[in-house]
Image (cartoon, grey):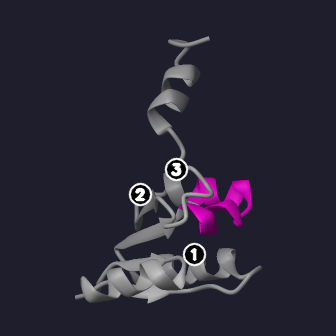
Amino acid sequence: MTVPIYVGDEVSAAGYRLAGVRVLMPRPGEAATALAEACAQAPLVLLSSAVAAGIGERPLRAALSALAPLVVVVPALQGDVPVPDLAARLRAQLGLEA
């Protein structure tokens, strides 16, 4: 059985580790590599919004839209980078908002 993986900062990682989640703390410039590694090893990947901001749009979109593993962007502890509002984006794409 595999466990979820959190990819993000060291402080948040400590809390996730206490909950039994494996953690990866990428160095600057290694976010895309850490995401790929996590996706290859876990059924669920929790990705800090700060780390998600450091990944290119195309690889991030591919990871978020893949059927497996499930990749979820979670709020960063510092709150510097907001979590994407997927509901608003979907409404805009469907033409329900201007």
The answer to which quarter of the image holds residue 33 is bottom right
Residue 45 appears left or right of 84 = left
Secondary element at tag 3: loop
Q: Is residue 12 above or below residue 46?
A: below
What percent of the width, then of the height, locates residue 64? Answer: 51, 55
Q: Identify the residue position indicated by label 1 in the image.
A: 35
Which of discs 2 and 3 lies nearer the camera? The answer is 3
The reply to whether the magenta stretch includes residue 16 is: no
Magenta extent: 49-62
Q: Answer with mark 2 or mark 1, whichever residue precedes in sequence.
A: 1
Tell me the kind of residue under disc 2.
Leu
Neighbor class of circle 2 (other Cα within 10 Å; few <14, some 14-19, many 20+) is few
Tell me the kind of residue under disc 1.
Leu
Which of discs 1 and 3 lies nearer the camera? The answer is 3
Q: Residue at x 34, y 80 (%)?
A: 16
- Label 3 near label 2: C-beta < 8 Å? no
Q: Residue at x 74, y 61 (%)?
A: 56
Residue 1's disc is: none
Q: Answer with mark 2 or mark 3, whichever residue precedes in sequence.
A: 2
Secondary element at tag 2: loop
Residue closer to the observer: 12 or 62: 12
Q: Residue at x 57, y 50 (%)?
A: 82
Neighbor class of circle 1 (other Cα within 10 Å; few <14, some 14-19, many 20+) is many
Which of discs 2 and 1 lies nearer the camera? The answer is 1
Distance of label 2 from label 3 (alpha carbons): 20 Å
Q: Identify the residue position indicated by label 3 in the image.
A: 83
